[in-house]
Image (cartoon, rainbow, N blue to C red):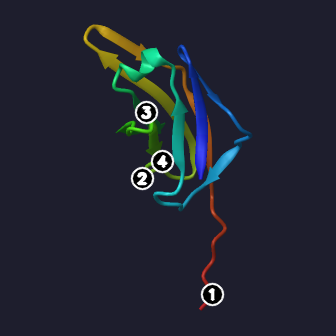
């Protein structure tokens, strides 16, 4: 599942109706960033913040990163940052809600 995010200056915009993701998925939810040229030069990195947990993921060659598996139910903040030489850029944050899964095991 891809979550498409447009980067416009220091702003992040989800480009489809995303309200939440479900806890428990591993290596399944990918954030794909639509970057303007000036961001592509800055070694862009996405930071996922939840409570005291801060996880940084350098975007791959397709400008995407997978949601880290160490996040739990609750709000998660997504920030993009990057730098090159003396130039540094940081975006505002997006809030992603991680909902509890309702998966049950029947034995």
Nearest the viewer among 3 and 93 is 3
Disc 1 to disc 2: CB gap under 8 Å: no
Name which residue lies at 44% across and 42% down.
65
Disc 4 to disc 3: CB gap under 8 Å: no
Numbered mark located on residue 33 in the image: none
Q: Give the residue at the far top of this rendering.
A: 86
Nearest the viewer among 93 and 61 is 61
Q: How many marks?
A: 4
Q: Which residue is mark 1?
A: 106
Name which residue lies at 63% across and 44% down.
97
Numbered mark located on residue 46 in the image: 3
Judged from the image, the secondary structure of the residue bearing numbered disc 4 is loop
Name which residue lies at 39% across and 36% down.
59
Numbered mark located on residue 70 in the image: 2
Left or right of 97 on screen, residue 64: left
Q: Is residue 80 above or below residue 53?
A: above
Judged from the image, the secondary structure of the residue bearing numbered disc 2 is loop
Q: Is residue 104 above or below residue 10?
A: below
Numbered mark located on residue 67 in the image: 4
């Amino acid at each position: 599942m891809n979550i498409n995010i447009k980067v416009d200056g220091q702003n992040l915009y989800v480009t489809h109706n995303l309200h939440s993701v479900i806890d428990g998925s591993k290596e399944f939810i990918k954030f794909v960033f639509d970057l303007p040229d000036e961001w592509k030069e800055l070694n862009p990195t996405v930071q996922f913040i939840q409570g005291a947990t801060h996880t940084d993921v350098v975007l791959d060659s397709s400008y995407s990163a997978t949601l880290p598996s160490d996040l739990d139910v609750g709000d998660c903040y997504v920030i993009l940052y990057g730098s090159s030489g003396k130039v540094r850029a940081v975006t505002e944050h997006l809030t992603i809600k991680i909902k509890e899964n309702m998966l049950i095991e029947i034995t």
